Image (cartoon, helix red, strand yellow):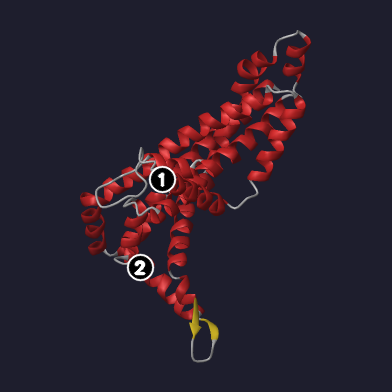
Amino acid sequence: MYSKKVFLPIRFIVILVGFISAVNLPILLTFNPYQLKVEFRLSFFKEYVLSNLSWFTHTNEYPWILQYFEGDGIHRYLYTMSLLGIALFIVIILSLIIATGIMLLPLPIQKRFKGFIDFSTTVPDLLIIAVLQYLIFFLYKTYNFKVFRLYGGVETEPYFVPILIVIFVPTLFLTQLILKEYTSEELQDYVLFARAKGLPLRTIYIKHIFRNIIPLILIHLKYIVWFLLSSIYVIEHILNIKGYSAALTYMYGTRVVLFVVGLLLFSLPLVIVSAIGYVVKILMNRKETASI
C-alpha cells in the first residue's frame, strides 16, 4: 500500500526532471567551432538542471503561468485539444469500420488488405504527412479546391485539413491492432461454438467479438494519442496554425517553469488515456480471476 502511495509522486518527479533535462540537452552537447569537435559538458548540464528545478520553488515564477493562460494561452490549448479529440474519435470509428469490414471479406481478399496495412505502417509517418500535404496542395493549385482552409493565421483555426492529415497513420496502426485482436479472438471457444451453431459472420463479429476487443483498444489507446499529439505538433508548424505548438515555442523562449508546465499540459491527454488503460487492465484481470 505504501509503495502505491509514493509511486505517483515519484513518477511525477521523474517526468519533471526528464522534461527539464530535455530542455537543457543543448548544454550537454555543444559544438566547438574552433577545434571542430563536440564537447560533452556534464558538469554544466547538471548545474543547469538543478538550477531549473530550484526555480519551481520560487513563488515569483507562477504569476507568469497564470498571466499567460488567462490570456490567449488557454484558447490555443483548447483548440489543439479539440483537434486531438476530434481526430481520436474519427480514428477509432474508422479503424473499427475498416477492420470489421476486412474480416467479413473472403480470406484471399483479407490477406491482400492485411498485407497492404502491414506495409503502410512501416512507412515513416513524416513521409506520409508530406505526401498528404502535397496532395492537398496539388488539388488546391490544380483544381482550385477551396472548400476547406489550408493554412492557419492569426485569427484562423482550420480543422478539416489538419485532422485529415494526422488521422492517416494512427488509423492504419489501430486498424492493424484491431485485425490482430480479431484474429486472436477467432480461436476462442465462444467463436467456435457460434460458428458451429451456424451463426453468420456478421453476427459473430459485430455482436460477440466486437464488444470483447473494446477493452483491448482502450488499453492500447495511449499509443494512438501519442501518434496524434506528435503529428498535430508538426502539422501546426507546417501549416502555420497558431495552436498550442506555437504557444510552446513562445514558452521555451520566455521562462523554463512556464515551458515545463506547458509540456505537462500538452502530455495531459496521454496521462489520462494511460490511466484509463491501467484501470481497464485491472478490471480485466479481476474478471479473469473471478471467472477462474
* Residue type at tag 2: Ser
Percent across and percent down for residue 14 are 48, 58
- Does 189 sit left or right of 49 as displayed? right
Residue at coordinates 66% horizontally, 27% vertically from top-left? 102
Residue at coordinates 68% horizontally, 25% vertically from top-left? 103
- Does 49 sit left or right of 116 as displayed? left
**In front of the other: 57 or 134:** 134
**In front of the other: 98 or 176:** 98
Residue picked out by circle 2: 54
CA gap between label 1 and label 2 equals 51 Å
Point out which mark residue 83 bears: none
* Mark 1 vs mark 2: in front: 1
Disc with the residue nearer the chain's start (1 vs 2): 2
Residue 283 visible at all:
no
Q: Quadrant of residue 104?
A: top right
* Residue type at tag 1: Tyr
256 lies above or below 224:
below
18 lies above or below 236:
below
Q: Which quarter of the rendered picture does the C terminus lie within?
A: top right
Point out which mark residue 140 bears: 1
Percent across and percent down for residue 62 are 25, 58
The extreme front residue here reads 142
- Does 121 sit left or right of 33 as displayed? right
Crowding at dot 1, Cα within 10 Å, few <14 / some 14-19 / many 20+, comes out as some
Residue at coordinates 61% horizontally, 18% vertically from top-left? 206
The extreme bottom residue here reads 34
Crowding at dot 2, Cα within 10 Å, few <14 / some 14-19 / many 20+, comes out as few
